[in-house]
Amino acid sequence: MTIQHDKPGTPQGPSGPEPTGSPFDELTDERARQLVARYPVARSALLPLLHLVQSVEGHVSQAGIEFCARHLDLSAAEVSAVATFYTMYKRKPCGEHLVSVCTNTLCAALGGDDIYARLRGELGVGHEETAGEPGTPGSVTLEHAECLAACDLGPVLQVNYEYFDNQTPDSASELVSRLRAGERPEPTRGAPLTDFRQAELQLAGFFEGRDSDVEAPSTAPETVRGARIAAEKGWTAPAMPDEAELPPVPEKK
Ligand code: FES
């Protein structure tokens, strides 16, 4: 059964109390209530709630699944089905930083595979494994990533979902060494680097005095070069006809 709010903004508490020893404090509980109140149907808050859980634990534990289930009046199985479907929800504790190397076709061909192999060798870990004690300063979780929507800037990697464009094995190695040493190198574009848990809190919708992160420029000059040249030369695309004839669809046999 789902909780149906009469209107958005009507907070509703969890269907049961937090069990003793829960890793989620009163502030997290209050944030969960705020998230639920943002949606006309409570279960719509599940994705940000899972990010909120990761901001506390660095992954989605069984306690995190039950926390979401209680707030949304869902079963643990329903929450688990969602948490295990999306790769952004981690089932093992993450490092202070999550390093995602794009090894999809274009980046792989441009050197993404070499970058991943170099980092795997230097960190001594494989996919979704962590160098250092997860959550402690300088710990780094490595993962393969599918296309990160920056193919024109490949090979790319992300640290806590912030972009580092046009990488090489050497530049990626230096970047990760700096993370391991406690530094926060500046991403190529986007918001200043934080850590995985803080990024997860932002993905849940809480910015903690870092509201300007949303405004950080995310466009790369390479990405808009075609549009800029078209604007300079006065090129435009032909208008779409109001009605376009669709090509015939072959009959299925
Ligand atoms: S293939 Fe790497 S960003 Fe698209």
Image (spheres, rainbow, N blue to C red):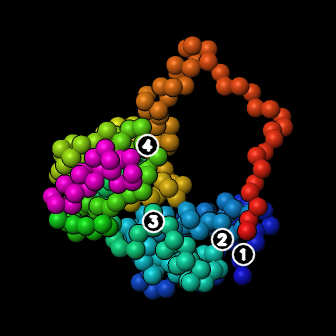
x and y percentages locating residue 84 in the rendered image: 49, 74
Identify the element where label 3 is drawn.
Answer: loop
Reading the chain from its start, which is encountered first: label 1 or label 2? 1
- Residue depicted at 43% across the width and 50% down the height: 148
Task: Indicate which disc, 2 or 3, sits on the residue closer to the N terminus.
Answer: 2
Q: Which residue is drawn at the image coordinates 39% and 51% (left, top)?
A: 105
Which residue is under mark 3?
Answer: 87
Q: Amino acid at mark 2?
A: Arg
Q: Nearer the viewer, residue 245 or 85?
A: 245
Distance between mark 2 and mark 3 Cα atoms: 20 Å
Separation of marks 2 and 4 at Cα, in angstroms: 32 Å
Residue 115 placed where, x, y %?
24, 51
Up-down relation of residue 118 to residue 5 (above or below): above
Please identify, in this view, whether the residue under mark 1 or under mark 2 is nearer the observer.
Answer: 2
- In the picture of the structure, the residue carrying the numbered disc 1 is 3
Judged from the image, the secondary structure of the residue bearing numbered disc 4 is: loop
Which kind of residue does numbered mark 1 sit on?
A: Ile
Task: Specify few, some or many for label 4: CA neighbours under 10 Å numbering under 14, 14-19, or 20 or more.
Answer: some
Magenta part of the protein: which range?
103-123
How far across and down, in percent of the image, does residue 217 sit?
A: 46, 34
Up-down: is 196 above or below 74? above
Alpha carbons under labels 4 and 3: distance apart = 18 Å
Which mark is in front, 1 or 4?
4
Mark 1 to mark 2 CA distance (whole Å): 7 Å
Instruction: Say which of marks 2 and 4 sits in front.
Output: 4
Q: Residue furthest top?
A: 233
Tag on residue 150?
4
Q: Residue furthest right?
A: 243
